[in-house]
Image (tube, coloured by chain):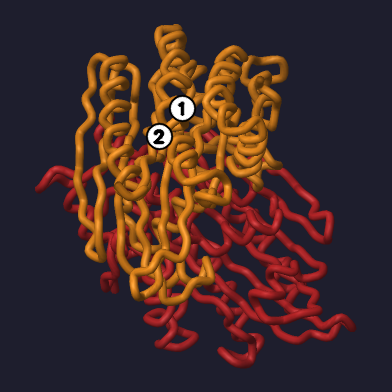
Chain colours: A red, B orange
Amino acid sequence: MSFKEQFTDYIHELQDSICNSLEQIDGKAKFEQDTWVRPEGGGGKTRVISNGKVFEKGGVNTSVVTGELPKAMQQAFGVPDSDFFACGLSLVLHPLNPYVPTVHANWRYFELYDKSGKKKDSWYGGGADLTPYYLFEEDARHFHGTLKGVMDPFGKDKYPKYKQQCDIYFCNKHRGDEMRGVGGVFYDYLRPSVEMDDNQMIAFQKANGNAMIDAYLPIVEKRMNLPYGEREIEWQEIRRGRYVEFNLIHDRGTIFGLKTNGRTESILMSLPPRARWVYNHEPAAGSKEAEMMKYYKPMDWV
Amino acid sequence: MSFKEQFTDYIHELQDSICNSLEQIDGKAKFEQDTWVRPEGGGGKTRVISNGKVFEKGGVNTSVVTGELPKAMQQAFGVPDSDFFACGLSLVLHPLNPYVPTVHANWRYFELYDKSGKKKDSWYGGGADLTPYYLFEEDARHFHGTLKGVMDPFGKDKYPKYKQQCDIYFCNKHRGDEMRGVGGVFYDYLRPSVEMDDNQMIAFQKANGNAMIDAYLPIVEKRMNLPYGEREIEWQEIRRGRYVEFNLIHDRGTIFGLKTNGRTESILMSLPPRARWVYNHEPAAGSKEAEMMKYYKPMDWV
């Protein structure tokens, strides 16, 4: 089986297993699926959970798209006359309880062809990052530690490198380099046989995808029953405003998807259920919210 | 007095008179002012109203900035080695009651110089647009009619042309060309002595600025005491999500300001106090919300 077939099968299995695990922990809401077809080739399965006991809003989406590379992308990549194949899984989960962090992850594979169908290039990308509203340091250590644990067998350099790329990427530069959360890992343009050999490369992707449940669900289980009130909700919504800002102003995938006529509702499933903007908001000195601000910057977690 | 001095004086007088009128109608909240200084030259006065009886959140901001044109802007405009002067007033008002529309307006003047200080170019820009959540057709007719009324003496071609530019500009292209509201007028790059003679041009700007209170406040007074409940709030917040999408994805001023190190809190005062995102939301067939969707497209109002 080709790597694109292998990875396509994998993301669909992973979508099933992640959705099952999330439904079990939620205990109330179920994912609803919308399949969509891309007129130019391919399509996707968008699975959304709403108004759960644990998850207020979230999506676990797969897509497999093919065809002529959109002109804007041919220009951006400097590859005229190219066709492409792209598949990936993207997830974002916004829990109800402000003590449970939001999580985002994505794993993707891309192939580029010339007009005769000959493969010119291929690469993997991916990552996962955690956005807590209040932080238990052990949660950030657990999340980062789990990601490091699955990357280390592929080289001790991987986690530090991709952790740093994540710190740089998930950052609201217009807010004085404030990170949207406590980071995780982020990598892109990993070419098979350049970064690692072909088989190792897909094994690396799968190890990362498989780690998601272990990295995130124990945190959810620990914090989902903590009591909270209007104060915590207000702070959660203000921080979710920052999440919206990052996704709409800085996130390459979101902007690219919207500008190249992607399926808007699938792309914007990443936006939180509720957000709030308060002019010049600053948490009171010494409050737990002011404390939290200290964590929205690159830090060593493992 | 030079035109830049005249227009600078004007926007500060207008800021005072608009803020006074809005405070009177609100009856509870007062504007709070933050003055800020731009390290490279100039600064601004940000005036924000929050948690009023009528206005949940709003800003009426002026800025007067000078110095070397930021490199990104030199590139965008194709004018290397340029200094600039820019001044303007921007306002956005988000009322509490979902039956009262949000309004946005902006009037600005720009001069460009070579390195010896010689003026190379200058232009005016401006506009006003209305974003209702529920529409009383007479309100859109009043808003558009007032704008047309002040433009007509400067040429019967002005309102139709700038109304159309507004329809094109304030549009969420990623949402199937859905407008964010019912439009108004929008114009840019109006060069004195090209578009009109110098004195007429500044008179046109002032006529537009002065029309704001007449165009908007009667609508506020008519609708601010209508009863509403959770249903109307939900719809208002969903539509405010669209407002956020427009401002962060498409609005040239917002994106440019954020990417060129403008004062973030003054730029993002335009964002609504609260917003909501519901996956694939569609108003129930035949509901007043479904009815409203028909108005978010270019229409003749006068």
What amino acid is labelled 2 in the image? Val
Q: CA distance from mark 2 to mark 1?
A: 7 Å
Compared across the picture, whether A142 is left or right of B30 comes to right
- Toward the right, the furthest residue is A116
Compared across the picture, whether B164 is left or right of B239 comes to right
Q: Residue at x 63, y 41 (%)?
A: B165
Compared across the picture, whether B296 is left or right of B67 comes to right
- Secondary structure beneath label 2: strand
Q: Establish if A233 lies above or below B218.
A: below
The x, y position of residue B243, in whole percent, is 51, 38
Q: In which chain is the residue bearing label 1?
A: B
Q: Decide: few, some or many residues near mark 1? Use Cα within 10 Å; few <14, some 14-19, many ≥20.
A: many
- Quadrant placement of the C terminus of chain B: top right
Q: In which chain is the residue bearing label 2?
A: B
> Toward which corner of the image does residue A39 lie, by quadrant?
bottom right
Q: Nearer the viewer, residue B142 or A198?
A: B142
Q: Residue at x 60, y 86 (%)?
A: A200
The x, y position of residue A125, in whole percent, is 57, 74
The x, y position of residue B85, in whole percent, is 35, 58
Q: Identify the mark at residue B92; answer none if there is no mark.
A: 2
Circle 1 sits on which residue? B102
Say whether marks 2 and 1 touch (CB < 8 Å).
yes
> Toward which corner of the image does residue B279 lie, by quadrant?
top right
Q: Residue at x 73, y 54 (%)?
A: A44
What amino acid is labelled 1 in the image? Thr
